[in-house]
Amino acid sequence: MVLLLAAMVVMVFGNVVLRYLFDTGIDISEELSRFFFVWLTFIGAVVVGRENAHLGVETLVAKLGDNGRKVCMILSDLFVIICCAVFFWGTWLQAEINATNYAPITEISMLWVYGVGYFTSLGLGLMALFRILRVLTGRISEHELRAFAGDYSDDEAHALRERLE
């Protein structure tokens, strides 16, 4: 993500400087920066999913006990898996069309752009599946269960305690 963002900054800033000083620009950098932004967004979604930082309805979940939170966690992860399956299937259905379409300037196959759907759907779906398995086998941590309900108090102390156990 850092490399994509850095490349975007260099390309866009370079084009601004070139247009300001020399009234010209590099067309490839405009197109590539757009493609990098798409990848950055979807990779970011997977990273945020790993950190459990996506939006949630914590007000309701916070009022439930541990068992209620686990049920809500399983249900929400099942919905995530269903959405990821639909996203993967849609990417799969469009793959042949995207593979034969080429970007106008770089002439890169558009599958390289829209193929990020494979990465995102598999990444988020597998994380949700593994979390369901951890809940069902009783290996979900108290810290993660509290964070699912929006309770981030004393995070460092709980994380340290879990590492020591």
Image (cartoon, grey):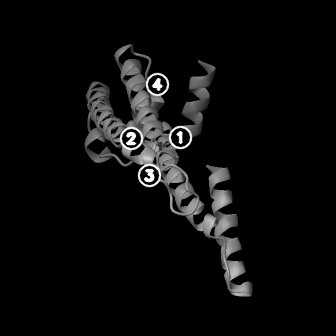
- Residue 89, position as x, y percentages in the image: 32, 35
Q: CA distance from mark 2 to mark 4?
A: 43 Å
Looking at the rendered structure, the secondary structure element under dot 4 is loop
Q: Helix, strand or loop at disc 3? A: loop
Give the SS element for disc 2.
helix
* x and y percentages locating residue 33 in the rendered image: 58, 62
Which residue shows up at 37% across the image and 49% down it?
Answer: 55
Disc 1 residue type (three-letter)? Asp
Amino acid type, callout 4: Ser
Mark on residue 141? 4
Give me the C-alpha separation between circle 2 and circle 3. Answer: 9 Å
The tag on residue 33 is none
Instruction: Say above or below: 5 vs 54.
Output: below
Q: Is residue 102 left or right of residue 2?
A: left
Q: Which of marks 4 and 2 precedes in the sequence?
A: 2
Residue topped by disc 3: 101
Drawn side of residue 165 relative to residue 143, left or right: right
Foreground disc of the pair 3, 1: 3
Res. 117 image quadrant = top left
Q: Callout 3: 10 Å neighbours few (<14), some, many (20+)?
A: some
Tell me which corner region of the image, top left, top right, bottom left or bottom right, holds residue 78.
top left
Q: Is residue 71 visible?
A: yes
